[in-house]
Image (tube, helix red, strand yellow):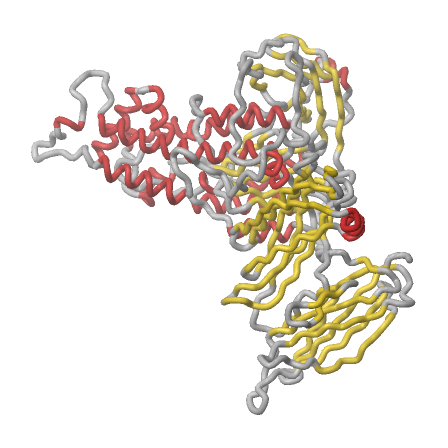
Amino acid sequence: MLSSRRLLLALGLALLGVTPATPQPAPTPQPLAQAPAPAGQPTFPAQVELVTVDVAVLDRKGQPVPGLTRDDFQVSENGAPQILTSFEAVVVPTPVPTTETAPPRTVVSTNEGTGTRRGRTFVVVFDDIHLSPMQATRARGAVAAFLQDGVGEGDVVTLVASGGTAWWTERMPEGHDALIAILKRLDGRYVPDPSPDRITEFEAMRIEEYQDEQMAYQVQRRFDSYGAVGQEKDARGVRPADAVSSTPGMIPEVVRMRAREVHELARSRDKITLEVLARAMESLSGIRGRKALILVSQGFVYDVQLAAMKEAVVASRRYNVPVYFIDTRGLQALPDAFTAAFGRPIEVQDVVAVLADLSREAEGTEALALDTGGFVVKNSNDLSGGITRVSNESRVYYLLGYNPTDLRRDGKFRKIEVKIRPEKAKGLSVRSRRGYFAPLEGEVARKEERDPVIGHALDSPFDIPDIPLRASTFVFDEVSLNQMSVQLAVEIDVRGLGFRKEADRANDSLAFLIEAQHRETGEYYRYDQQIEMSLLPETRRKLEGSWYPVTREFTLPPGGYQAKIVVRDLNSSRVGSLVHEFDVPAPGQLRVSTPVLSDAVETGPDGSRRPVLQVRRSFAPDSTLWCQFGVYGAAREEKGSLMPRVTAGYEIRRTSGLVFKRSAPTPINPTSVGALLRLSGISLRGAPPGEYEIVLTIRDELAGRTVERREPFAVKPG
């Protein structure tokens, strides 16, 4: 029996995608190099720290109260009054739902010009490893309502799945549809145990951690009633002698072993979720403005032995991110595992005890929310109303800062209490985090399993502009069944890199990483390399104008993608990051590859000319614009040559619609295997500086189908 239990435990952990010893919250990049702490992560002197507290003040109707000043607040730590050293009152305009369609996606993404950020920053953690399929349906509805009514223009939302299938950031409202598409595929991965010897996580924790004999007796009696394995009775109605200890006060072995298995599996799940929460909060380091993390989950028990719980509270304090817990269990009755849908229902005499324990099944999550200054939405089937309260509360808030008078670095919890002065406090309620853990003298930082700088850049919802980057995607033909050839091109500004001069060359090393996620499946595609540069003066001057190009080829299925590109200068430790979104079309229909626009050509191994792959879309007024594209999915003649018959023409237009140059459609000559490829050289002589687009018109003469492709570019001043 024991070996089969261990097998079931291992199977359960495998279904979660983890092992008990080293659970992982999500796909994470491997280290590229050692690095200092992430940019924006606060560091403190040895004795004095600034404690920052987010405070929401609400009236009797639950509406945020503006207009308060520094003098209206009183702050104490462990009962000792504290002097405010910083104060900021923030008012965010009320979100206005919009029905406007999202603007078209730009062809080239860049982190240049990343300036002042407007709006708030939310991280929504869809805790799928703690959600049953039934609860996941309610959770999706609540998050969808928040995305529709709870966010406003300029707000940034990151949707994270604790099981690792989503980490996706969008700016609202244009990112609404992408987040909804991801939300639709998220489901619950927690399956309640229907076996006769089922046991709750709270019962397992009490028995395993506290040797709770009364709890064990309750579980033993239930096992006996259900006829659980190891509790069967013989013909005389007596259980085997080894099923129950003969020593008073001892816990039956079958109960102890079952509790250990359930507790180990529960702790693995809890650790995963808590590590994801800490990682998500760390991703918001260095970001000013209102930040909030919304945890949508059935919750987990309060386990004081779980170090990850303390680490999550510490992360909230360090990065000033309150946690809001949306309990998906709704109006609470018996747990799913104790209903007839999952097996024999619980005996009447145990109903009261189980209901008493039910509220404790999410005590850990509730404590986390209250300790970090958030709130809990529970015992309600209106989850959408609860989650939109988070948005309402974050419209008006106050940032209070103080240097604690207690300078001991003892690692203990310090209770924070924020009050409004009595003369203004009538009818008002205050919400803030309940406290924080003090630093611990000599505490060793937890060893990171990935480069912290690279990890922070990957997780952050915002681009890092310290190294300017630009990126574009080129989609070509189908290379295997439902798999498309995609080239992701990146250009790196070398002007600010930390080159070291050696002899007549400038040398530097770059860590380069791309991590792309498929919107429809959550699958990750990753590429990293270390780039060694040793540049002659002439080459360096050229690259300062054109930037350093890096191209990576991927084979991807159709769908939407979000790629995070990170470049780190190993000489100067500067980092640049960029989010680039693109779509890969499905094969099997008439379509055009992504046109390559360039002002330079090169000769291939076969002697043919082709444009140099460039991300830059800005060209000199007297240059030649080279445009190359392929045509796929065209019909072929059924007799004779068996070749396609396709014509193509173009117009170059100003954004005003004025046509600068036009070419009438002409046939594209297929290759010997029927491939259709066209290269055109178009003089830009006489083109006034400004924004343009080239409009390609391709017609399949056999099938009678026409497609049009528009590509923007600019003519820069001479």
The correct choice, above or below, for 434 with respect to 263 in the image is above
User: Can I make out residue 499 in this image?
Assistant: no
Name the spot of residue 150 as percent of width and height, x first.
Answer: 65, 41
Measured as percent of width and height from the top left, residue 456 is found at: 61, 36
Identify the residue at the far bottom of this view.
Answer: 640
Viewport quadrant of the C terminus: bottom right
214 lies left or right of 84: left
- Which residue is rendered at x = 78% and y = 20% of the image? 69
* Res 123 seen here: yes
Splitting the image into 4 quarters, where does residue 685 fall?
bottom right
Residue at the spot 54% in from the left edge and 15% down from the top edge: 442
Q: How many marks?
A: 0
Q: Residue at x 72, y 50 (%)?
A: 548
Q: In terms of image quadrants, where is residue 688?
A: bottom right
Which x, y percent locates residue 117? 75, 39
Looking at the image, residue 175 sits to the left or right of residue 227; the answer is right
Quadrant occupied by the N terminus: top left
Q: Is residue 189 left or right of residue 406?
A: left
Counting from the top left corner in percent of width and height, residue 316 is at: 59, 27
Depth check: give the residue in front, 312 or 506.
Answer: 506
476 over 172 or under it: above or below: below
Q: Which residue, as the protein is rendered here, is positioned at the far front? A: 503
Q: Residue furthest left?
A: 236
